[in-house]
Image: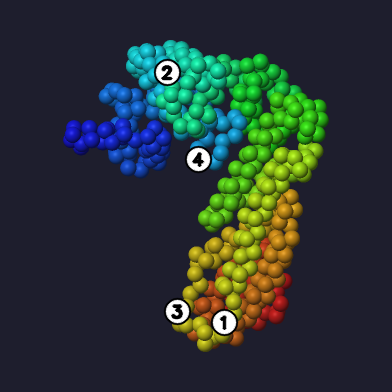
Amino acid sequence: MSQTSNERLRDYLAQLPPQSQALLMREFERAIERGQDTVVATFVLEELRKVVRGTDEGARPRTDDPARLMFRLLEPFLVEGNFPRRPGQIRRASLLPVWQWLIRDGAPEQAREFEASLNGLQNAETTSALEAAVRTFQRAAADAIVAIATPGTGGDRRALARVGGPDVLEDLLPIGLLLQAREAIDTLSGRLPIHFRLFAESQISTVSTALNVPQLQTPQLLPFALSMVMQRLTAPWQIIRLAIKMAASDDEIRVAATPYGVAVTIALHDLSFLTAVLRTDIRRGHFDNVAEHLKTLHEGVRGLRTELDLRNDSTWGKQLTSIRAEISNALQSEIDSVPGRVRRILRQRADKDISIGARVDSTEVDEAVALIDFVAVCRTYASELAINEVTLRTYSDLQQYVEQATEALVQSLRNGDIKTRAYRQMQVQAAIRFCEVLFGHDYASLMSRAAENAVTGERKPSRAG
């Protein structure tokens, strides 16, 4: 592109709202990671970074980007998307507006010194010097953020409005407090195991001791400390066990009265978020992760119901009831649709109604197999997710229908018109795939041999298996 074109692009990017700039940066970074349109993505990303930093210096490689280095501490707590954030989370989209405010108004001199330090370290192999520069600027940034964001400390509305919108302002104070608490956060991370295979009494005691740091016990930072623990649990919902231990009771009123009661709020929020993900996947016909989501939801709902004494009319009790209802509604309509889709594929049609060249849609068969497997997975977790009746009824109906339809289709191979045999064989192949899911490999193999015998004219028993 010519210099004039470069300037036009930069002017356009500079006019975009901070949220749009942040979104574009994330999308172009992801495109580069995927290897898609890397030339265009790299060029636009470089121009975006120049706009954000307010300088024409060459773009720094991603790992040396000043904003990334500054906010690296926050990575475990960042969330994407539009789903409401919970305590212990920060929106990734808030980082760019906060960074722009820091280099423009919050700590501009320190930001320039930070950039200069990084430029001086570009060709050096001194990790400690880099860390020292990052920590120095993090302290300056934290002081500036806390000074403007703490209620009653002089942060007027006009000054706050220059930082960003309501979502950014909601994240502003937690960002500042986390930067201030870097030492405590790093220490906690080092004291926690990388992964808790179990979270029983001894592990809970270890975590309780690690969390017993005054700086982490504040209402603002405790949720973030609990989020760090959750990320290392095999079953994240088990974070409520910390709250139960601190309350020395499973009664929800006593648990809610402790600072650790926020752990229950966090667990419920994450179950609600996973329910929304499950609902979206089902609507889009994406069943790859459904089994894993259902397992997590089943264990979480059961864990909260059994380990906490929840009242149906309490806030937490109503939230859990709502989650179960949402799961049931998301699953039930899809479960109800499965028998009809299977019948459309296996329906016996008269020879005269089958045109020459008729085919069974392989994509429709694949979708039906995925749906039958989906019903089978739902059956495993049905009781806790309030879908017991519909799941058991549907699965039983599918077994009965598929067994009868498969035998009838095999019989039609033996007695049907030779002109329709190709279509009948496709139906039988679909039926055998359904049998594999519903009855197992042995039964499906038996029916496959029966179909081969029917085609070659060999006799077989009228009822297999």
Of callouts 3 and 1, the N-terminal one:
1
The residue positioned 54% from the left and 63% from the top of the image is: 366
Of callouts 3 and 4, the N-terminal one:
4
Instruction: State the SS at label 2.
Output: helix
Circle nearer the viewer, 1 or 2: 2
* Amino acid identity at mark 2: Gly
* Amino acid identity at mark 3: Gly
In the image, residue 418 sits, relative to residue 31, either above or below, namely below
- Residue 357 is labelled as 3
- Residue 349 is labelled as 1
Residue under circle 2?
106
For marks 3 and 1, give the CA distance: 15 Å
Circle 2 packing at 10 Å, graded few (<14), some (14-19), many (20+), is many
* Percent coordinates x, y for residue 57 in the rendering: 28, 23
Residue under circle 4?
81
Circle nearer the viewer, 2 or 4: 2
257 relative to 181 in the view: left or right: right
Can I make out residue 299 in this image? no
